[in-house]
Amino acid sequence: MRAVNCRWMLTFAPFLALALLSAYPVMAQEARVFANCATPVAETPPPADGSDARPQLGDPHYVTTCDVRVTDAVTVQSVTAMARGQPAPLDTTFTAFDAKRQVVSTMFLIQVVDPQRLRMAQWMAEAVTKIAEARDGKERYAAYSIANDLTLLAGFDASKADFEKAVRGLKPQTLPTQLYQTALEAIAALAKEPGDRKSIIIVGDGNTDDTGYTHEQVVAAARAAGIVIHALGFIEQATELPRFQILRRLAEDTGGFRREVRIARDQPRYTISSRFSAEVLENGGTLKVNFKDLKGPVVVAIDANLAGNKRESVEKSFDIPLPVQPPKPVVDTRPEPPAPSTNVDRLSAWVKDNPLISYAIGLGFGLAALGFLLFAFGRRPQALPPITSVSKVEAPEAPGTVYGWLEMLDGNASRHPLKTTNVRIGRHRDNDVCLQNDTISRRHAILHYNPDTKRFVITDLGGDNGVVVNKLRQKSHELNDGDLIELGEVRLRFRPNLEFVG
């Protein structure tokens, strides 16, 4: 009986764990304060009596301005600042962000999902349109799909109706997802748009097939452009929940909001409300801090008072310049020399005061005299034979490692060397092998060298015309010497370097 029970537990334990995982409630993210502060600048204080008189010269006060935000969906009621070691708060002025006066530019990146996940795609479109339909004032929205490329669905100038139609019209497809690459392209595009605040909202499960770019590159680009990344998770199965950690990390490292909205076909874990823009994209505001008499290194705690009697803070370090002391005048205490009485005395005094110049003048006269004597009494030198030029011999460049070649069978019959273990092929100029042909996709295929088998494998990246090897269409295929590769209308012959490839 005990053995039967053990077999029953081993059989149903995975299903029970999956059910518990999918039913477990997602905890709210920890609200954190982000403050992006400018370098302190000098500001001359006004007269103490409040008059319009010109202020007296003195040590200026230093001030800074900070863009203060909170990573959760909250309302920021007030913000204060306290310097470490000081008994009283600093003088501050907090101005809440005003979306009717300030520009908010937000870009949605919607992941293209498989046709089997049609219902999940509809929920994702519903969330995007719910956020964008509440636009008011100077809020601007654009929508892109992300798969193998970044594709525009609706631009910033699209109307509400056109925006919703484009988002809901995104069709599920089975395509690889280049998450980091498309995110970098989106950051570059959004950086050129106007906006007092700029945000990217990634909607999907976090799946990525990207191997050419990294998390660190995306975070660095976003911070440099002043862009915050938010993440809304839609996960088809509870076992795929770890994928969403990729999006969570992007949001956390750029100060963004992140939440799992739906997992499998359960009820929503987080409900998108009409207040999403106000509480996530537009919370916080601008804080002006006056350091007054503080100088040198200063650590300031910025406290945000939130709705519901909550309070969050963050510490920022500043270096306040010390007052510059004017240099003391240098007094020459040497006695004045007596005035020369004759021209000879004056010349002697001048030579003593200027020894280097005197030596140079004397040397010049000596050389001139010597030259005159040689010219007058010396023999005319024979003409020197002409100097023949010596051609410069350049050292040959050290050859790099070449794992093989792709030989063009059409056109100019050129050869493309395979110099890396991951060779990208496509029409876009950032590929390792760039093929300018309309039948080639921007990122058509990739050649990967396996050091264990010492063989190259070609993989289709979802191009329209696919990959054909020896007249057979292949998704992924291990190549042999002389294999014929057809990418659209382009025909190539694979030739390995037998030193590296078996």
Image (cartoon, rainbow, N blue to C red):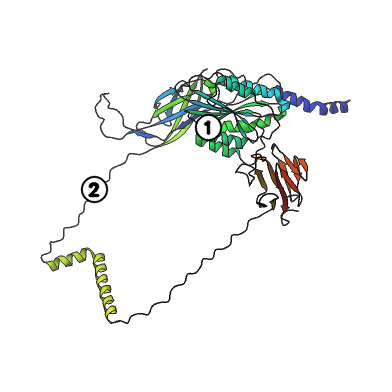
- Left or right for 237, reference 196: right
Q: Are marks 2 and 1 in contact (CB under 8 Å)?
A: no
Q: Can residue 450 be seen at all in this image of the molecule?
A: no
Quadrant housing the N terminus? top right
Q: Which residue is mark 2?
A: 329
Report the disc number at residue 190: 1
Q: Residue at x 47, y 72 (%)?
A: 388
Report the disc number at residue 352: none
> Residue 256, how many percent across, how many down?
55, 29
Q: CA distance from mark 2 to mark 1?
A: 55 Å
Residue at the limit of the structure toward the left, as seen here? 341
- Left or right for 291, reference 465: left
Q: Quadrant of residue 55?
A: top left
> Residue 333, how many percent across, how many down?
20, 54
> Residue 103, how many percent across, how many down?
47, 25
Mark 2 vs mark 1: which is more N-terminal? 1
Q: Quadrant of residue 123?
A: top right
The secondary structure type at the circle numbered 1 is helix
Q: Nearer the viewer, residue 349 or 473?
A: 473
Three-letter residue code for mark 1: Leu
The secondary structure type at the circle numbered 2 is loop
Q: Residue at x 42, y 24 (%)?
A: 94
In this rendering, which labeled residue sits more in front, label 2 or label 1? 1
Q: Residue at x 73, y 46 (%)?
A: 485
Three-letter residue code for mark 2: Pro
Q: Residues within 10 Å of mark 1 (few under 14, many from 20)?
A: many
